[in-house]
Amino acid sequence: MAAIGNRINSVLLVLVLLTMLAVLGVLATGVTGGPLDPPGPPGSTDSVRLPGTPISELPYTITESGNYYLTRNLTASSTGNGITISVNHVTLDLMGFTLDGNKVPIGSGSGSGIAQSGLIPLRYVTVKNGTIVRWGNSGVNLPETIFGRYEDLTLPFNGGFGPDGVGLWVGSGSIIERVEADHNAGDGIRVSLVGSGGGATGGAVRDSNSGQNGGDGLQLEDSMMIIDGNTFIKNGQNTGGAGIRISGSDNLIRNNLTDSNGYGIYLEAGDKHNEFARHRAWHNTLEDCHDLGFWDAAATDPYPNEWGTRRSWTVYGIVADYTTTTPWDAMLNFCGTTNPAP
């Protein structure tokens, strides 16, 4: 019995020692819980070298194709553009940082946050992941750049001094996703027609918001684009601006909301073969759907019967709160409310 008791005591002693060693190990490593507060804005990465070319000061001109990235928030110290791109095949990652044009007050300074050199068309430029704010002209000013990609950008309070004042201005065939453009002096987003026939096809504006801009929420001059899942609110209320203004053709416009703009949808002369589906137009001060291909030979329409011939519209499931007693009201209730969505 004495031997058994001694064994038990030995086992207990070993267990006690192991427990003490485990406690000492935890105390030595200083293990604590993580922070309860969310992290702040990104810190400078000036001392961290990533793949590509770092940009740590303004102004900066990109003259070679490749990848570029910001290392910290950058603020303009003089007039002129922040970053100028002069070559094809460029990816510019803002890394969550801000390009600040330093307009104090709003309206001073004439440069754009990101611009192209001259009017020679560029191709395959990507700008992503950051904020471009308070530039006297435009936030992104690349109207002659085709096949570009612009994603995860915030573009507020640009314009007021330069001739344009657009949040994001790009060329044909652009892919625009998750962009927030608000409180710009001109349009929030503008996609230009570059070259005869557009020069590019297959672009898109998706999952973006453009609101409280002085001009249009989206001005679409290009053709064969998809405009899907966007919100355009309070644009051009005092200037005759529109949530969506279209002068291009063969576009697909679906699942968007235009609310409290000057016009909800404004179609310019010359546009044709556009298709609208599941669009909502509410509370627009002038008209929810201006010239949406359903105008009859009224005195206000310079193109008699164009709704069924020249423009060849296809409209599904458009819903609007605009009411009227004019002749075109009988034709699909002005915004196609009697035509069910496919």
Image (cartoon, rainbow, N blue to C red):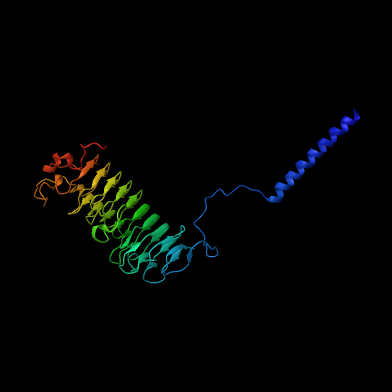
Q: In the image, what residue occupies the spot 91% across and 30% down?
A: 2
Q: Residue furthest bottom?
A: 78
- Splitting the image into 4 quarters, where does residue 222 fall? bottom left
Q: In the image, what residue occupies the spot 24% across and 45% down?
A: 275
Q: Is residue 39 left or right of residue 216?
A: right
For the residue pair 89 and 242, the one nearer the viewer reads as 89
Question: Which quadrant of the figure contains the C terminus?
Answer: top left
For the residue pair 79 and 245, the one nearer the viewer reads as 245
Q: Is residue 141 left or right of residue 241?
A: right
Report the number of numbered marks. 0
> Quick check: 112 above or below 324?
below
Q: Position of residue 294 (x, y in %)?
A: 16, 45
> Quick check: 305 above or below 342?
below
Question: Which quadrant of the figure contains the N terminus?
Answer: top right
Q: Position of residue 85 (x, y in %)?
A: 38, 66
Q: Residue furthest right?
A: 2
- Splitting the image into 4 quarters, where does residue 188 fall? bottom left
For the residue pair 273 and 61, the one nearer the viewer reads as 273
Q: Is residue 133 left or right of residue 279?
A: right
Residue 112 appears in the rendering: no
> Quick check: 60 above or below 37?
below
Q: Position of residue 21 (x, y in %)?
A: 76, 45
Residue 174 appears in the rendering: yes
Q: Position of residue 70 (x, y in %)?
A: 47, 63
Q: Residue furthest top?
A: 1
